[in-house]
Image (cartoon, grey):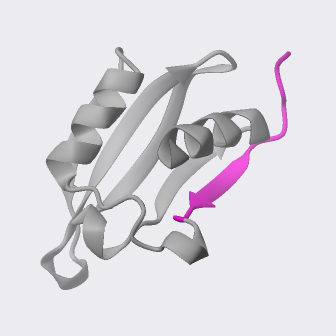
Amino acid sequence: MSDDRRAAFLCYPPTDRANAWHMTFDGFRTALEHAFPNAFTRLKATSFQGGGHLAFEVATPDNPGLRGIAPLPVEECGCITLTDASPTDAAQIAHWLLH
């Protein structure tokens, strides 16, 4: 069933396991592409402290173009942001991140 409610969702690792994700840029991209075979990823620079982020797009059953960003390096900030996502989309990504 499609959910028309859309919002930005921020996904953080569990507070009792703050280092649970321990992902590098390449590790995150590889895991994302393995879990979502049609994933699209692109590295983008930001002007904030010379950093960057990984922009990604994956297909879920309810959203063929779910977009998100992961700050780089991922291991310094575990927050994964989903944009224009339904609660169902966010739950699928959160489940994937935790397993």
- Horizontal and vertical percent position of residue 79: 47, 65
* Quarter of the view holding residue 72: bottom left
Residue 61 as seen in the image, left or right of residue 66? right
Residue 53 as seen in the image, left or right of residue 63? left
> Quadrant where the N terminus lies?
top right
Residue 77 as seen in the image, left or right of residue 82? left
Image position of 28 with respect to 21: above or below: above
Q: Residue at x 69, y 19 (%)?
A: 62
- Horizontal and vertical percent position of residue 39: 35, 24
- Horizontal and vertical percent position of residue 61: 65, 15
Helix, strand or loop: magenta stretch: loop
Q: Is residue 57 magenta?
A: no
Q: Residue at x 52, y 37 (%)?
A: 96
Residue 49 as seen in the image, left or right of residue 21? left
Image position of 94 with respect to 16: above or below: above
For the image, the number of numbered tags is: 0
Task: Identify the magenta region.
Answer: 1-13
Q: Residue at x 41, y 32 (%)?
A: 57
Q: 49 or 38: nearer the eye?
A: 38
Image position of 64 with respect to 79: above or below: above
Q: Is residue 11 magenta?
A: yes
Image position of 74 with respect to 76: above or below: above
- Horizontal and vertical percent position of residue 81: 51, 56
